[in-house]
Image (cartoon, rainbow, N blue to C red):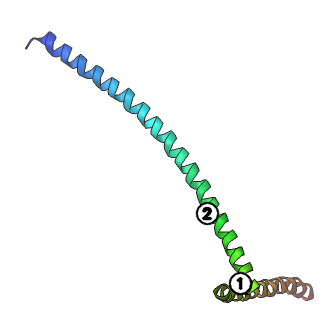
Amino acid sequence: MSDKTVIVNIEKRVRQLIDDHKRLSRLCRDLEREREKLRNENRSLRARVKSLDTELAKRELCEGLEGSGHNREKARARVNHLMREVDKCIALVGQSVERPDDDKDA
């Protein structure tokens, strides 16, 4: 094989590699855009699911308070849980109000 043939073959392979690199770079950019689009869609769908879960919980609570069987027990448990949380918050507020008065006496 002559030196010229070897050089020509190398040139062809280099051109092919450059073309492959350009093609794969475009493909990579396209895939990155698609990934970002899918991430945004996923974020949006997660927010929607969270919103719908909240809506469902509210509806179940309302149905339970209206008096339907199984939901009634769930609603009662939910109200009790919320009342305990409110009591804890009131206790914390009471503690934070008492502390400044304690400092004044000192």
Amino acid type of disc 1? Answer: Gly
| Residue situated in front as seen by the camera: 38 or 28 | 38
The numbered disc on residue 49 is 2
| Residue situated in front as seen by the camera: 3 or 105 | 3
60 sits to left or right of 21? right
Q: Is residue 81 above or below residue 51?
A: below
- Pointer 1 with pointer 2, Cβ within 8 A: no
User: Which image quadrant is residue 81 in?
Assistant: bottom right
Residue 28 in view: yes
| Residue situated in front as seen by the camera: 81 or 99 | 81
Residue at the image position 90 percent from the left and 86 percent from the top: 101
7 sits to left or right of 81? left
Residue 66: give x, y in percent of width and height: 76, 84
Check disc 1 and report the residue beneath it.
64
Please identify, in this view, whether the residue under mark 1 or under mark 2 is nearer the observer.
Answer: 1
If you read the primary sequence from the N terminus, does the residue marked by circle 1 or circle 2 appear first?
Answer: 2
Residue 78: give x, y in percent of width and height: 69, 84
Amino acid type of disc 2? Answer: Val
105 sits to left or right of 63? right
| Distance Cα–Cα, label 1 vs label 2 | 22 Å
Q: Residue furthest left?
A: 1
Residue at the image position 83 percent from the left and 82 percent from the top: 93
Residue at the image position 65 percent from the left and 65 percent from the top: 52
Tell me the element at label 1.
Answer: helix
Tell me the element at label 2.
Answer: helix
Residue at the image position 71 percent from the left and 74 percent from the top: 59
User: Which image quadrant is residue 2 in?
Assistant: top left
